Amino acid sequence: MSTFKYVGLTAPGQLGYVEAPVPSPGEKEVLVKVEYAAVGPFDLYNTDLEFFVSGYPYRLGLSGAGTIEKVGLNVDDLKVGDRVAFVAFAYPNKALLDYAIQPRSLVSKVSTPPFVAFESESAVTDTLQIPDSLPLEKAVTFPDNFATAFYTLFSQIGLPIPTEYPSKTSPPRSAAPILVYGGGATSGQYMIQLLALAGYKNIITAASKHHEDYLRSLGATHVVDYRSPSFVEEILAAAGGKLEIIIDVIALSDTFRDIHTKLITPGGSIAFLSPFKLGSGSLTATDGKLVSEVLEEVKGWFAEDVSLIVVKTFFFQEDERLANTLLPVILSKILEDGLIAPNRTRVFEEGDLLARVQGAIELVRSNKANGEKIVVKLT
Ligand SMILES: NC(=O)c1ccc[n+]([C@@H]2O[C@H](COP(=O)([O-])OP(=O)(O)OC[C@H]3O[C@@H](n4cnc5c(N)ncnc54)[C@H](OP(=O)(O)O)[C@@H]3O)[C@@H](O)[C@H]2O)c1
C-alpha cells in the first residue's frame, strides 16, 4: 500500500508529520492530488483551543485545490487531470493532505479562460490582469468562504437565490442598506461581491480604512473603519438609520453588545459566522471562549423580535436547493465566467512542509492576515 506524509496536529498545539495510506475514492467520490490548501481561523481554533478536535492525529484545512487523481463510481462529470477546488467538510477528508478524498458534491471544476483576476490592491483601480486560467493558488481561496457567503445570504438570511449572475433584475428591496461587519476578512470580501452580483445597491462594510478602494471595487458602497470612535454614528449616517440586515463575519461578543444593539432595527436579522467569540476582543485571540450557539445572555441584549442567526456552513447541504449545486454548478460557473475576484493571497511555499504550515498558522494567529487568504503549497 502506498503512503504519504501530511502535516497535522499530533497533540494539543503541536504540529508534526503523520503518515497515511493513499486512499481510494468510493461511490460518488473523487481522489484529489492537492497542490494548495488554505489555512484560516478555524485551523487556528483547532490548534490552539482544540475546537472541534475529535482526537489525535487531527487533520487541518477546509479548502483545497489540485487535480483529479482518481474518480469513484457514479461520478460522470469529472475526469482524471481535471483542475478542481473543494470544501473539506466531511472529516477526516480534510484539505491539508497530498491526497484528499472528497464527495463529488463538495468539488468545483476550475475551468480555463476567460478569467479576469485582481492581482493586487493597486491593480484593482488601474490594470486588470488576465492570466490564461485561474491559478490553483487563487482557486483555493474560494470554496469555504464562497460557500459560506452564499449560504449565509441566500439560505440563512433568506435573500432570494439569483437566477443568473450578474442578476439582470433588481431583487426586492435592493436599495435597503445591508451591513457586512468585517468586509476586510476573506469571507467578508465574498459576501460583498455576492451581494453586488445579486443586485444589492447599498452595501455598507466595516473594515480597516486602507481596504477602502479595494472593497469599493468589489461592490461596497460605504466603507467605515471599525476602529473609528464614531463608528456607530458613521454607519447610521451611511445607512440613513438603523439596519434590517447585519452580517457579522467576525462575531465578537463586544461588537454584539456595544455596536449591533445600536444598529439593528426592531424585527431585523443579524447573521454571524460561527464560532461566536465570547469575552474576547479579537478574531484570533485565545483568551475568550468559542461557542457555536446563540447564548441566552446574548439574546438578552436584543429585543425579542431581532433574529440572531448562527451560520454553520458545515450544514449547508441540509438546504436541498444547495446540496448538489453550490459547488458543482454555481461556483464552477462563477469561476468559469470570472465573475468574482479571488481573495488576494499569501502563499507559503519555502522550506519543508512543516515549516510552511507553522508559518501559515502563525500568521493567522498574529491577526495580521490583512485581508489575504493564507495558502500553503503542498507539492
Ligand atoms: N461558520 C462557518 O461556516 C464559517 C465559515 C467561514 C469562516 N468562519 C469564521 O468566520 C471568521 C472569519 O473568517 P475569515 O476566514 O473570513 O477570516 P480572515 O480572512 O482570516 O479575517 C482576517 C480579517 O479579519 C478582520 N478583522 C479582524 N478583527 C476584526 C474586528 N474586530 N472587526 C472587524 N474586522 C476584523 C481584519 O480585517 P481588516 O484587514 O479590515 O482589519 C482581517 O484582515 C472566523 O471566525 C472563521 O472561523 C465561519
Image (cartoon, rainbow, N blue to C red):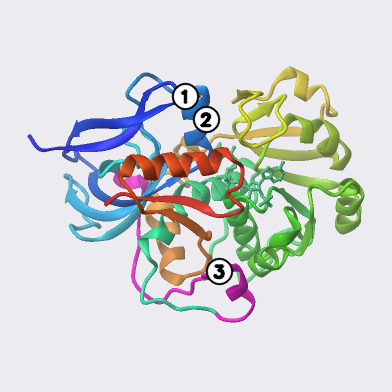
In the rendering, at what x and y percent does residue 47 appear? 47, 28
Foreground disc of the pair 1, 2: 2
Assess mark 2: CB under 8 A from ligand 1?
A: yes
Q: Is residue 52 left or right of residue 111?
A: right
Q: Which residues are magenta?
A: 103-127
The foreground one among 296 and 176 is 296
Q: CA distance from mark 2 to mark 3?
A: 29 Å
Q: Amino acid at mark 1?
A: Phe
Question: Tag on residue 379?
Answer: none
Residue 102: quadrant of the picture: top left
Position of 57 relative to 24 (above/below) = above
The foreground one among 226 and 177 is 226
Name the residue carrying label 3.
120
Say which residue appears at 51% left-offset and 52% top-offset. 373
Foreground disc of the pair 1, 3: 3
Q: Amino acid at mark 2?
A: Tyr
Of all residues shown, which one is farthest toward the front? 351
Question: Tag on residue 45?
Answer: 2
Is disc 2 placed on a helix, strand or loop?
helix
Is disc 1 placed on a helix, strand or loop?
loop
Position of 358 relative to 375 (above/below) = above
Q: Amino acid at mark 3?
A: Ser
Position of 46 relative to 33 (above/below) = above
Say which residue appears at 20% left-offset and 40% top-offset. 27
Say which residue appears at 17% left-offset and 45% top-offset. 72
Neighbor class of circle 3 (other Cα within 10 Å; few <14, some 14-19, many 20+) is: some
Q: Are marks 1 and 2 in contact (CB under 8 Å)?
A: yes
Name the residue carrying label 1.
52
> Which numbered disc, 1 or 2, marks the residue that appears first in the sequence?
2
Say which residue appears at 54% left-offset and 67% top-offset. 165
Q: CA distance from mark 1 to mark 2?
A: 8 Å
